Amino acid sequence: FTVLGSDQPIIAVVGEEVVLPCQLSPRMSAKDKTIRWFRDQINSPMYLYKNTLHVTDEQNQAYRGRTALFEEKLEIGNVSLRMRNIHASDEGIYICFVQSLTWYEETKIEVIVTGTGSVPLIYLDDYEGNKIRVGCKSSGWYPKPEVTWTDGKSQNLTTVSETIETENDGLFSVNSYVITDVSSHKPTCHIRNNFMKETRDSSLQISDVFFPRVSPWLMAFFVLLVLVSVAICMAIYCWRKQTLNWQDLE
Ligand SMILES: *[C@@H]1O[C@H](CO)[C@@H](O)[C@H](O)[C@H]1NC(C)=O
């Protein structure tokens, strides 16, 4: 017999379930065979079926309780593996290895993991002079997402800083900033999973009152200060001129 897998990589979505296809050819029962699904170490399988039993003592810890065969399909040689709750670390090559008393065959299946993260949180971060820095953050992305900003219409805004970090679960989180100085802009952040072509957006309308302006009272104060200074200078000038005149007379 031979085993047939898939020429195409299998796309697995974070947190969801995936089926890794594997089929005996010609069609025959797999119940009397050993079925071993593994990644790099044959001795640490993700799933092992032997003597009609699911054997757990050798099973790789990371896959315990997450993998299963379709029991009712073994009769027709379908030894596909069902894997639940996909993690970022599940990306890679898997081997479906089937062994009878006299023969063995295997096939490789590539798994690509992808995840679209949370709806971004957009927020007022700080003042930058009389402009405002706006931040955008989101987590749960795989692979690394792409962040762009627009002004709420079609103009792009320039990102001033961006950090992408790997979290404990292997997924990426992103934090990006722009600076805006006019209330007509409605900063909008777009985070994109280029692999799945999925985007999540958030935008923030900042009303005029949040943009710092020179207050009319402050303006009046400065004008007054200038006028008072001029008056004082003139007073000193006149006074000195007068004392000089008196000295001349003496
Ligand atoms: C095996 O059976 C499962 C469950 O019905 C199905 O999803 C899968 O496509 C089958 N695989 C093949 C190679 O026929």
Image (cartoon, helix red, strand yellow):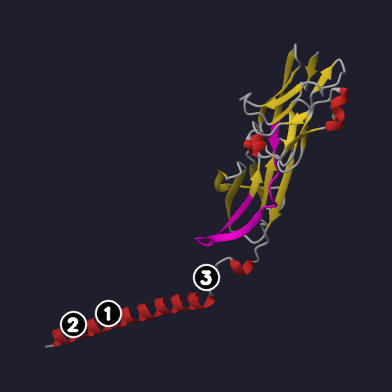
Disc 3 marks a residue whose amino acid type is Val
In this rendering, the answer to whether 140 lies above or below 224 is: above
Q: Give the mark nearest the N terminus, 3 or 1.
A: 3
Q: Is mark 2 within 8 Å of ligand 1?
A: no
Q: Give the mark nearest the N terminus, 1 or 2.
A: 1
Residue occupied by mark 3: 214
- Location of residue 181 in the rendering, given as x and y in whole percent from the top left corner: 58, 58
Q: Are marks 3 and 1 in contact (CB under 8 Å)?
A: no
- Location of residue 104 in the rendering, given as x and y in whole percent from the top left corner: 73, 14
Disc 1 marks a residue whose amino acid type is Tyr
Total marks shown come to 3
Quadrant holding the N terminus = top right
Q: Report the front residue among 200 and 88.
A: 88
- Location of residue 57 in the rendering, given as x and y in whole percent from the top left corner: 65, 33
- Please identify the quarter of the rendering in which residue 114 is found: top right
Residue placed at 36% from the left, 81% from the top?
A: 231
Badge 2: residue crowd in 10 Å (few <14, some 14–19, many ≥20) = few
Residues at marks 3 and 1, CA–CA distance in whole angstroms: 33 Å
Q: Nearer the viewer, mark 3 or mark 1?
A: 3
Say which element carries label 2: helix
Residues at marks 3 and 2, CA–CA distance in whole angstroms: 44 Å
Q: Nearer the viewer, mark 1 or mark 2?
A: 1
Disc 2 marks a residue whose amino acid type is Leu
Residue occupied by mark 2: 244
| Residues shaded magenta | 112-138
In this view, the residue farthest toward the top is 102
Residue occupied by mark 1: 237
Magenta residues, dominant SS class: strand
